[in-house]
Image (cartoon, rainbow, N blue to C red):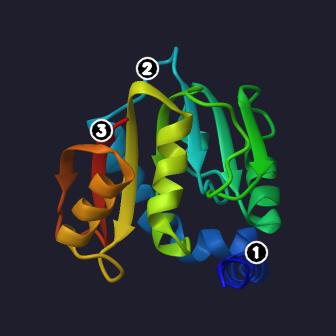
Amino acid sequence: MHDRGKRRIRESYDSLGGRLYDIRYQIEQDVKYDVILRRSPPSLEKIVLDDGCGTGLLLKRLRNTCVGVDLSHHLLSKARSRLRKKRRIHLIQADADLLPFRDQIFGEVFAVTLIQNTPNPEHSLSEMRRVARAGSEVVVTALKKAFTLQGLKQLLEASGLALTSIIQDEELKDWIAFTIQ
């Protein structure tokens, strides 16, 4: 069941393609990135993971050494094109539930508009927790139409992430949760 769900998500984003993805979602994503980076800009010495990086919109804003992971080949292709001049960014096609990294490597993890697209969000969050260094911030957004505020809080707690704050802006389609690994 999970493999079919992942295949469906990948095919959906692959069929959308990077250009259409940006037309459809860039403004909405940029608003979330503005809120997140105002509240929690990563210090330059941290290695950052953008889990579900899509077309690289967040990565384009960062000056850190970054790794972007996405399931969609087509979205990563657009990210490669967008980020080709940025040397400290590495893009990998991978599954958020099976991150191909050793434990505790990242100083900060972002998962923007990802967990509602995973068949087992608790497992996906546990994977993020696994690859984040002790004490690192893990920033997670979740679509309000997919998660209630209480449901998101319970999910974060079940995954072992400690919630430090949550942004509940009425104008955003997402909850933005700041957690510590």
Q: Position of residue 99 (x, y in %)?
A: 67, 47
> What's under tag 1, amino acid-wise?
Gly
Q: Please tell me whether mark 1 sits on a helix, a strand or a loop.
A: helix
Q: Residue at x 82, y 64 (%)?
A: 73
| In front of the other: 180 or 123 | 123
Q: Please tell me whether mark 3 sits on a helix, a strand or a loop.
A: helix
- Quarter of the image holding residue 21? bottom right
Residue under pointer 1: 17
Residue under pointer 2: 43
Is residue 58 shown left or right of residue 153? right
Q: Please tell me whether mark 2 sits on a helix, a strand or a loop.
A: loop
Is residue 71 shown left or right of residue 120? right
> What's under tag 3, amino acid-wise?
Arg
Q: Position of residue 162 (x, y in %)?
A: 26, 42
First reached walking from the N terminus: tag 2 or tag 1: 1
> What's under tag 2, amino acid-wise?
Ser
First reached walking from the N terminus: tag 2 or tag 3: 3
Tag of residue 38: 3
Q: Quadrant of the N terminus?
A: bottom right
Characterize the local packing of mark 3: few (<14), some (14-19) or many (20 or more) Cα atoms within 10 angstroms: few
